[in-house]
Image (cartoon, rainbow, N blue to C red):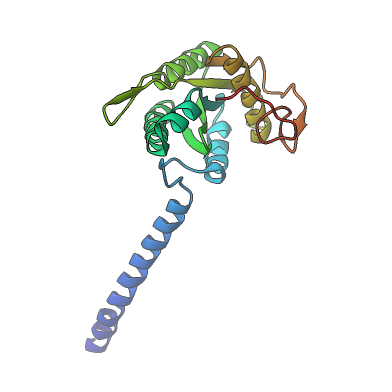
Amino acid sequence: MSYTLAAVSAALPVAAGWSLHSLHLRRRVEAARRDPLTGLVTRDAFTERAARVIAKGQSAVYLIDLDRFKQINDTHGHAAGDAVLRATAKRLMHWAPTNDGIAARFGGDEFAAVTRVRSRTELMWQADELASMLAVPVSFEGRQFIVGASVGAVPCASNGLDLSALLRRADEAMYAAKQNGGGRFLADGPTPVHRTVNGRRAGRRGTAGGSEVAA
């Protein structure tokens, strides 16, 4: 009996050590899946989690591009730009889970989200709420920066739809919003209507010959 107790006692520190190691490893993996500046998930983690939201039923996919970010970043410096990105992320972290969804930073001043919606009316309400929330000025070192955002939203009524296609359609809607001076624009359906170059909308920044309106 004493031998058994001794063996168990000896094993406990090993088990505890392994448990702590596993916890540390999980935290490192999770940190690698988040944007270090904003704390939002990255594109890969978003793709995985967004698919789970869409699988639950009616939902919506959003693409968000800040409107005056480049001007603020160029005029007031990267610290001000970083403050704007962090403030945007904080708002998205509150808004997306409230609507049973997830938000991500794709890079630069581009963000994405997916939420549950039950009707087009609810989609309009959510998109308006998001655009209004992102239009609230950001405070940094005694200054108030009015940024705003162009929000493209696309409804998704089937869990069989391809997320990359939904994001392209949301990107088209976002561009339409930007051409109209910002705010939100709702796509009529989930199917992209513009030609793509390397999986991105033709004319978009980052594609050959891209000449999109400056953000």
| Residue at the extreme bottom | 3
Eyeballing the image, is 94 above or below 119?
A: below
Looking at the image, how many numbered discs can be counted on the residues? 0
Q: Position of residue 129 (x, y in %)?
A: 43, 16
Provide residue 162's location: percent of width, then percent of height.
68, 34
What residue do we see at 53% from left, 20% from top? Answer: 150
Given the current orientation, which residue lies at the most extreme front position?
75
Residue 208 is left or right of residue 172, and the answer is right
Rendering quarter of residue 40: top left
Residue 64 percent coordinates (x, y): 53, 26
In front here: 154 or 63?
Answer: 63
- Foreground pick, 34 / 99: 34
| Residue 211 horizontal side relative to residue 72, left or right | right
When asked about the image quadrant of residue 27, the answer is bottom left
The residue at 51%/10% (across/down) is: 121
Which residue is situated farthest in the left direction here?
2
The answer to whether residue 162 is left or right of residue 184 is right
Quadrant for the N terminus, please. bottom left
> Relative to 32, is 15 on the left or the right?
left
Assign the C terminus to one quadrant of the image: top right
Provide residue 110's location: percent of width, then percent of height: 53, 32
